[in-house]
Image (cartoon, rainbow, N blue to C red):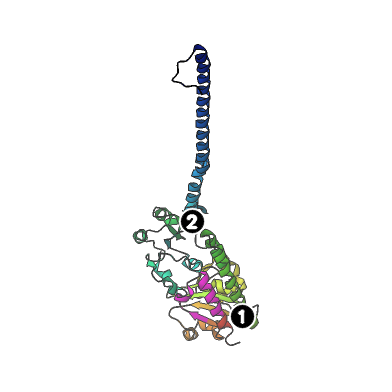
């Protein structure tokens, strides 16, 4: 190696200067290449660690989608909570309980339902059945409202998302539980409950079929202070248990009318036409002995033969799946008690 402190000759300077220039160029190139490699490596690492913008947005969109869902109703497609926590059930309370969807509020009459009122501890009274009390509903801060009243939709929908299922659209326990099971994402719970329901209904029907002739006619009647009514298979008073679950039929002459209209107000003059061999009678005041003392009612074969089942409105009015199951077994026990 040359001593840089010694005087250089021209030849030496001619050799050293190009060499130094070459070394400087090589060093610069290496430095640039190293910096470039480091930058490339850093960018690659950053790209590996950070998701692309689209990937970052996707989980957020999915989370939002999971919180609500769109359902089709009589009022069009509406968004409802995917997992509602504070439901006000103005109707269909008895279809929510089998799905373990206990509401925060419901009308007083439904809360008095003898077939399941023990399950409703803490549920608030929202007022008279069929007479919406907006103030009481607002106070409960619901995230979903269920009702059968199309007329109340505009008011209710301003409080919370509202699903209207008009009275009579759901014809039986299977339709009700299936509908609400889908609405709440509880399809399995609905199917399991209905499987047990079907087993018990089949057992009750088999008992009745073995005891009562197939051609015997049945009537669903109600006696109030002011009128007499006949009912079909989807208007409470035992219609679903008797006509649907047990498969019994009304008198042939009035069958089509009763099943199509679902109810009829009767005069005493036509009572005998609507009265079958067996009568399921709702009355809050009258007993079978009272009917036997009445000149009109005592002329009916069902009354003469003690084939009248009298129960009060507090038991016969309800028509939810839980009530229908209990009523079916109750009527089956009566129909087979003396057979």
Counting from the top left corner in percent of width and height, residue 122 is at 38, 69
Residue occupied by mark 2? 82
Q: Which residues are magenta?
A: 309-331
Counting from the top left corner in percent of width and height, residue 230 is at 52, 72
Residue under the image location 47 percent in, 57 percent down:
163
Is 328 a magenta residue? yes
Specify the farthest residue to the bottom. 338
Neighbours of disc 1 within 10 Å: few (<14), some (14-19), many (20+)? many
Answer with the quarter of the image where residue 214 lies.
bottom right
Counting from the top left corner in percent of width and height, residue 47 is at 52, 39
Front residue of 215 and 196: 196
Residue occupied by mark 1? 208
In the image, taking residue 189 as reference, residue 225 lies left or right, namely left
Magenta stretch, main secondary structure, is helix
Neighbours of disc 2 within 10 Å: few (<14), some (14-19), many (20+)? some
Is 206 a magenta residue? no
Residue 182 visible in image: yes
Residue under the image location 52 percent in, 59 percent down:
183
């Amino acid at each position: 190696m040359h001593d840089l402190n010694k005087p250089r000759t021209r030849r030496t300077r001619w050799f050293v200067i190009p060499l130094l220039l070459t070394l400087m160029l090589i060093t610069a190139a290496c430095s640039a290449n190293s910096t470039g490699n480091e930058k490339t490596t850093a960018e690659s690492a950053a790209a590996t660690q950070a998701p692309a913008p689209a990937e970052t947005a996707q989980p957020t969109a999915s989370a939002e989608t999971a919180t609500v869902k769109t359902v089709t109703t009589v009022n069009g497609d509406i968004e409802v909570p995917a997992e509602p926590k504070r439901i006000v059930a103005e109707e269909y309370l008895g279809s929510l309980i089998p799905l373990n969807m206990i509401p925060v509020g419901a009308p007083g009459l439904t809360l008095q339902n003898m077939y399941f009122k023990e399950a409703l501890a803490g549920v608030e009274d929202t007022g008279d059945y069929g007479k919406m009390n907006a103030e009481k509903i607002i106070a409960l801060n619901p995230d979903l409202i269920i009702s059968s009243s199309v007329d109340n939709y505009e008011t209710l929908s301003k409080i919370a998302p509202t699903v209207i299922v008009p009275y009579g659209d759901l014809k039986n326990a299977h339709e009700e539980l299936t509908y609400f099971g889908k609405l709440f994402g509880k399809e399995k719970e609905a199917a399991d409950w209905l499987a047990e329901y079907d087993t018990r209904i089949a057992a009750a029907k088999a008992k009745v079929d073995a005891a009562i002739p197939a051609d015997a006619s049945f009537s669903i009647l109600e006696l109030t202070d002011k009128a007499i009514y006949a009912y079909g298979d989807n208007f409470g008073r035992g219609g679903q248990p008797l006509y649907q679950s047990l498969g019994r039929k009304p008198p042939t002459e009035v069958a089509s009318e009763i099943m199509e209209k679902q109810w009829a107000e009767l005069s005493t003059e036509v009572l005998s036409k609507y009265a079958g061999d067996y009568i399921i009678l709702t009355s809050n005041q009258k007993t079978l002995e009272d009917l036997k003392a009445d000149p009109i009612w005592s002329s009916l074969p069902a009354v003469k033969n003690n084939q009248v089942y009298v129960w009060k409105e507090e038991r016969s009015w309800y028509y939810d799946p839980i009530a229908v199951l209990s009523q079916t077994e109750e009527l089956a026990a009566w129909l087979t008690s003396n057979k």
